[in-house]
Amino acid sequence: MNPQTDVLDEIGQLYMTELDKLPLQELDRLIKLVTATKDAAALYLSTLQSTLHGRLGGHAQKLRQEAGKSTGTVRFEVDGFLVSADLPKRPEYDQHKLKEAVEALRKWGEDPDNYVGIEIKVSEAKYTAWPPGIRQLFEPARTLKTGKPIYKLEQVTAPGSQVATNDSNFGEVA
């Protein structure tokens, strides 16, 4: 075993009453080891997700484009695995431009609270439901960024036994 998993086993074998009796120096040592383990695990997970993105990201992007979207989840099968590739939306808004848009709404006789939150953040769900004229007003303040790609693998028991939920592209191999 390595030191990272050893510390988890060590803590897992202790009862709460035993942990309560440990000196602070020992608790500090365990906390530092667990924190280092958590940080290493996060780094390893990020590296593995980057590997999956490098291997599967192009095909996932192609499926999104074919579906007419730039973000969201697509599913496809590769080498006996059902791949769920999610690229979350991360919209950001320029605060100064948002203030200008809110003032324009007020001049139009509209209540800005119907369109934006108190912190002048714009809900993506509200944004997509707005009439085109309102959306156009806020477009200069909006920048659409994406989050980190997330991939999940689920082994398919038998070819063709799993039904994908994204579109007719299921079954194509990356």
Image (cartoon, grey):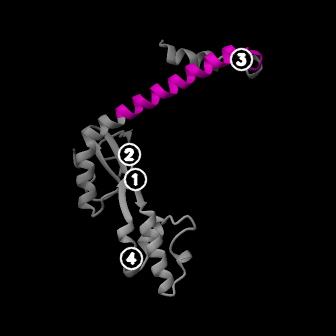
Check the picture and name the quadrant holding the C terminus: top left
Q: In the rendered structure, which amino acid carries the disc numbered 1?
A: Pro
Task: Tell me how far mark 2 sits from mark 1, CA to CA.
Answer: 7 Å
**Quick check: 40 left or right of 15?**
left
Q: For the residues carrying marks 1 and 3, which lies nearer the camera in this image?
A: 3
Which sits earlier in the primary sequence, circle 4 or circle 3?
3
Going by the numbered disc 3, the residue's amino acid type is Leu
Identify the residue position indicated by label 4 in the image: 137
Residue 33 lies within the magenta run? yes
Answer whether labels 2 and 1 touch (C-beta < 8 Å): yes
- Which residue matches tag 3? 24
Is residue 165 among the parts visible in the rendering? no
Nearer to the camera, 10 or 121: 121
The x and y percentages for residue 101 are 44, 75
Dot 2 corresponds to which residue?
148
Label 4 with label 1: CB-CB less than 8 Å: no
**Residue type at mark 4?**
Leu
Instruction: Tell me where residue 148 appears, x and y as whole percent.
Output: 38, 45
Residue closer to the observer: 86 or 130: 130
- Evaluate whether residue 167 shows in this view: yes
Q: Which stretch appears magenta?
A: 20-48
Q: Earlier in the sequence, mark 4 or mark 1?
A: 1
Instruction: Using the image, determine if residue 62 lies above or below residue 155.
Output: below
The answer to which image quadrant residue 72 occupies is bottom left
Q: Classify 6 as above or below 47.
A: above
Asked which quadrant contains residue 35, the reply is top right
